[in-house]
């Protein structure tokens, strides 16, 4: 929006409003004096016009100015004004004195009454625009922004207090509110004049400061926040997450939607356990992704998620030999959601731990259910990088499996090679611990990465699963066929079992058998099936 001439005039008038009012009011005095004089003197009605500047002076400027204008008016229409300008007869002293007193009373009372009204309006404004517990400006305060901030570019930051529930639980709300107020004071003292700090939620502050550089702005705020907070002599550990975004005009700060970007970035930082995140359209997920993530924990708790099972077939006997558990999400509004649409999102957050725990528990239940029917079935579950590098993963998994009473031989972990490559040393340590306890590790999606089989020998893997992309071309592309053949031969030489994924045609089965592949999995044999379906399918297939 471009500024017009009218806008500029309005801005100037607003800025010099008081000075202009004083000049106008003062100019009215001689003007009214002239009117009264020219119309024949004080005996006519025009002297009453003097109430206008007196009232205005009191209302617009205040009681003192009201009294000053009243006195000036009283004198102008008093000894300086005759009763009749033709005869030039002066007024009786009591008359003009009485008028002067009335003028003063009006000037003072109008000024005083308006002063009181203004004062209580200010108080109401203050109450409305500040959080009552913490005394920090709230979102109503944003309406004042055009008057306070006038820099062009702004950095907008959302500060989340991640452990606020903890602080409240342990130390109570009073301590928490005092802490927030301390944080507010610390921030306000260090920020430039044209900055603003607002409390937009019980655990959320918004900071607006003139834009320098997003990363440095976020780091600066972090440096202010990362100190030892002490409330009522209690040292507090406070965990913050910051999201930062840039806006090109302070006017945009009036729109609450502007804050969605920094809110989302802060939420992202919080979920990913990082201290700050700069809003980036490409990297940050869409709002719908956030809402999906937000409901995921609930989905797990309410069992909106469920497992389907896809069998692996032993190519020597053509009988099933184990299952792979694959997660699905039956969303109450969106319907069935496939794992590719939510696993990558969940994997970016700590929720992946809950997901894998949930899958493991359910897979163990399924093994037990088969066991009750007299069938021993091994189930593989997919494990993410975040799981493997979680320091508590191993203990948690062992506890769950031990509590279930299921034999460790029957649970297997599928891990992709890219996961191992993030941190080969650590992966190796965790995998060795698992294998030592009797859990087999299968290398998923082999061939989709770049690592060689020779390199992979350092990891305690029992099985290699050849990526399903190879099966799509194995019949038509002789090079692909050659690669699969070599991979199978080499794997077998190295002592690994080999599974081919994504087998959809009978011809592919033939080729794989020729190459000496041990197992296969794919739509040709069976699609992933529900818990009930798989029980029936598996029992029949074994016969
Ligand atoms: P994945 O581990 O490679 O799983 C195999 C995928 O291939 C499954 O897709 C399966 O339905 C599909 N598939 C099986 N046979 C065929 C076939 O013959 N042709 C084709 N074109 N596809 C076939 P799904 O169930 O959609 O899972 C996709 C990916 O999501 C999985 O790939 C896995 O990486 C991930 N995922 C699924 N469940 C879980 C889980 O519980 N935890 C984790 N961390 N990841 C999971
Ligand atoms: Ca898999
Ligand atoms: Ca796979």
Image (cartoon, rainbow, N blue to C red):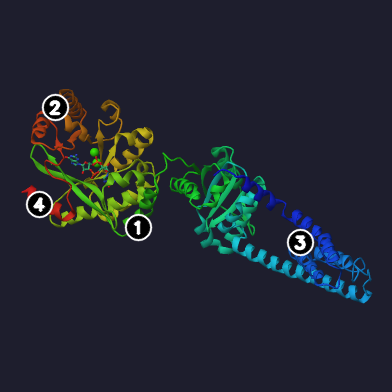
Residue lying at 83% horizontally and 74% vertically, measured from the top left: 102
Q: Which residue is mark 4?
A: 539
The residue mark sitting in front, 1 or 2, is 2
Q: Which residue is mark 1?
A: 298
State whether label 4 is within 8 Å of ligand 1: no
Proximity of marks 1 and 2: CB atoms separated by less than 8 Å: no
Give me the C-alpha separation between circle 4 and circle 3.
Answer: 93 Å
Give me the C-alpha separation between circle 1 and circle 2.
Answer: 46 Å
Which of 372 and 505 lies nearest the eye of the viewer?
505
The residue mark sitting in front, 1 or 3, is 3
Q: Which residue is mark 2?
A: 476
- Residue 130 in sight from this viewpoint: no
Rendering coords of residue 232 (x, y %)? 64, 60
Indicate which disc, 4 or 3, sits on the residue closer to the N terminus.
3
Give me the C-alpha separation between circle 4 and circle 2.
Answer: 35 Å
Indicate which disc, 4 or 1, sits on the residue closer to the N terminus.
1
- Label 3's element? helix
Give me the C-alpha separation between circle 3 and circle 2.
Answer: 91 Å
Q: Is residue 177 above or below residue 500?
A: below
Q: Quadrant of residue 470?
A: top left
Indicate which disc, 3 or 2, sits on the residue closer to the N terminus.
3
State whether label 2 is within 8 Å of ligand 1: no
Rendering coords of residue 86 (x, y %)? 91, 68
- Label 1's element? helix
Q: Which residue is mark 3?
A: 61
Q: For this view, does 78 lie left or right of residue 139?
A: right
């Amino acid at each position: 929006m471009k500024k017009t001439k009218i806008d500029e005039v309005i801005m100037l008038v607003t800025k010099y409003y008081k000075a202009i009012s004083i000049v106008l009011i003062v100019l009215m005095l001689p003007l009214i004096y002239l009117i009264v004089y020219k119309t024949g003197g004080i005996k006519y009605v025009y002297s009453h016009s003097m109430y206008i500047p007196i009232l205005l002076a009191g209302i617009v400027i205040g009681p003192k100015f009201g009294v000053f204008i009243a006195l000036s008016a009283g004198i102008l229409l008093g000894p300086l004004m005759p009763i009749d300008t033709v005869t030039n007869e002066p007024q009786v002293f009591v008359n003009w004195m009485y008028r002067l007193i009335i003028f003063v009373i009006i000037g003072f009372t109008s000024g005083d009454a308006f002063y009181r009204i203004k004062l209580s309006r200010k108080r109401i404004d203050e109450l409305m625009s500040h959080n009552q517990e913490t005394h920090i400006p709230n979102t109503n305060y944003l309406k004042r922004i055009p008057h306070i901030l006038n820099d062009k570019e702004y950095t907008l930051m959302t500060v989340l207090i991640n452990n606020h529930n903890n602080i409240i639980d342990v130390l109570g709300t009073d301590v928490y509110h005092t802490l927030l107020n301390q944080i507010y004071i610390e921030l306000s003292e260090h920020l430039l004049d044209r900055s603003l700090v607002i409390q937009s939620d019980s655990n959320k502050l918004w900071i607006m400061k003139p834009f320098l550089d997003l990363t440095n702005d976020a780091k600066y705020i972090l440096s202010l926040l990362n100190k030892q907070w002490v409330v009522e002599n209690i040292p507090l550990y406070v965990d913050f997450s910051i999201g930062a975004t840039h806006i090109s005009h302070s006017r945009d700060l009036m729109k609450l939607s502007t804050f969605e970007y920094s809110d989302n970035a802060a939420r992202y930082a919080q979920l990913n356990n990082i201290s700050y995140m700069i809003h980036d359209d490409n990297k940050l997920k869409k709002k719908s992704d956030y809402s999906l993530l937000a409901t995921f924990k609930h989905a797990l708790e309410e069992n909106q998620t469920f497992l389907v099972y896809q069998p692996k077939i032993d190519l020597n006997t053509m009988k099933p030999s184990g299952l792979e558990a694959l997660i699905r999400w039956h969303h109450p509004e969106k319907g069935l959601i496939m794992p590719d649409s939510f696993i990558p999102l969940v994997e970016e957050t700590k929720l992946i731990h809950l997901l894998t725990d949930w899958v493991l528990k359910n897979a163990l239940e399924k093994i037990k259910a088969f066991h009750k029917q007299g069938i021993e079935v091994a189930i593989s579950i997919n494990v993410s990088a975040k799981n493997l590098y979680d320091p508590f993963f191993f203990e948690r998994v062992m506890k769950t499996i031990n509590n279930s009473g299921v034999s460790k031989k029957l649970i297997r972990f599928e891990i992709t090679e890219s996961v191992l490559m993030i941190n080969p040393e650590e992966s190796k340590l965790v995998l060795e611990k698992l294998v030592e306890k009797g859990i087999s590790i299968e290398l998923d999606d082999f061939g989709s990465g770049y690592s060689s089989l020779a390199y992979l020998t350092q990891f305690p893997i029992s099985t290699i699963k050849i990526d399903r992309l190879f099966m799509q071309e194995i019949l038509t592309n002789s090079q692909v066929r050659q690669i699969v053949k070599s991979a199978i031969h080499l794997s077998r030489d190295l002592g690994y079992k080999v599974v081919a994924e994504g087998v959809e045609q009978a011809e592919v089965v033939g080729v794989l058998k020729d190459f000496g592949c041990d197992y296969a999995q794919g739509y040709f044999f069976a699609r992933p099936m529900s818990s009930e379906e798989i029980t029936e399918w598996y029992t029949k297939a074994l016969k």
